[in-house]
Image (cartoon, grey):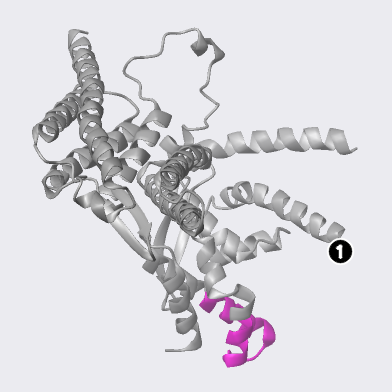
Amino acid sequence: MANTESLENVVLELRRGVIVLAALSQLGAPEYGYSLLKKLSNLGLEVDQGTLYPLLRRLEAQGLLESVWKLEEARPRRYYVISAEGKKLLPKMKKEWAGIVAVMDKMLS
Amino acid sequence: MNLIDRYVSEVGKNLPLLNGREDIEKELKSTLEDMLEDRAQSSGHARDEAMEIEVLKEYGAPQKVAQTYNPHPYLIGPKMFPFYLFVLKIVLTVVVSVMLVLAGIQAATDTPFMGADFVKIIGQGLGSALSAAIAAFGNVTLVFVILERVLPDKEIGGFDDEKDWDPASLAKEPDPDSVSRSELITEIVFTFVALAILNIYPQWLGMFFFTENEQVFIPMFTEKFFQFVPWINVLLAAEILLDIYLLRNAIWTRLTRLGKVVIEASSLTLTVLILRTPDIIAFSAESLAGGPFPPEQAEVFVTIATYMFPVIMAIVIIIQSIELVKAVYRLFKMNAK
């Protein structure tokens, strides 16, 4: 029981660590929150709504994302897209990620 | 109002007081509508209340959802917490020690020395120390809660930021215009405690006696002292504002140096005025007659209190004069650069 809980916590922490990179990498074109959630899910990354929406707002506050409200099918939707600042940061984050993956592969193989 | 609107409104009520609450509610509603539309498509039947309940249950309790948007879940954040503990330990040690010493003096001077009254005084003394400790704890916590919200994040980050720390800086002379955050925070806390005592707990400025089931309070100061309290308040508040400004900006400027000179000079003037005001001490043979002292002891106590007050004030004036000279010197030194 304790082992399952520990595993769940570790997996949760690992996922949390990659959500920022995952979200930034998928926001080259504007997406609204739910569509991004589905997109990430289709790519194999399940993210909790309670994690994604506040994260998108934080990234916008940090200047890495931009957002705009659009009225679609009589429903307003907030679209997020990567900002110029985010675009500058993304390649560095990708490089960092590749480094981590390489190191961990070496350790775990 | 349907179930979705009620849920969104419930989340809104629990959101922290920040800009964009309406925006969050609007986005949440839009997301829930998207989820329901998606669910209806995949299930092959139109949305109904059961589906709404299912989606809302999946989304989570309104309080929990609102909590995820809270950027500041701490009363006092982890970066400020070590300073909070540091100041709290000092304040609690001082307050409890003073209250216990006062209780000890009272028990030692009271007659009969041993017996029910003695036990009662010790008990009351411990009670006073406990209530003083709780009040001090509350006040210190309040100050830090305010600082946590007033100071910008990067300033709070500076308290334990090791990134910019350079061991070579140990060999360098400290910059005379840089501020010491720990000193400023300690000063803010003590100034706030002084403000609280003067305005909320003026009854602490005096002596308590317990005689025959009766509690007697003998004030230390006359009304003449309390006429100065508004001016003392202004100076203490100015000191706190200056300290907060310095904490935010992390460096002394000509304006803040000038402000410090004005505050120090005004404090010195006020102390001199208080010292020169006659009949400011309320302890007298008559006022102590209600206490446990025999008349001869009361007279000795009044004499000590009457002579000690100018001595203490003289010490305060010397300290304030030194502080004023230091403030003026630093201002001139800065102007000379």
Q: Which residue is at the front of the view, B222 or B165?
A: B222
Seen as rendered, the residue at the extreme right is A109
What chain does badge 1 belong to? Answer: A
Q: Is residue B66 above or below residue B108?
A: below
Image quadrant in which you'd find residue B213: bottom left
Q: Is residue B35 above or below residue A31?
A: below
Q: Which residue is at the front of the view, B320 or B79?
A: B320
- Does the magenta segment cover residue B52? yes
Image quadrant in which you'd find residue B221: top left
- The quadrant in which the C terminus of chain B is found is top left
Name the chief secondary structure element in magenta. helix
Q: Position of residue A45 (x, y in %)?
A: 70, 58
Q: Please state the extent of the stretch shown in magenta in the rendering.
A: B32-55
The type of residue carrying mark 1 is Met
Q: Secondary structure at mark 1?
A: loop
Q: Residue at x 61, y 37 (%)?
A: A93
Q: Is residue B135 above or below residue B212?
A: above
Q: Which residue is at the front of the view, B283 or B76?
A: B283
Residue holding disc 1: A1
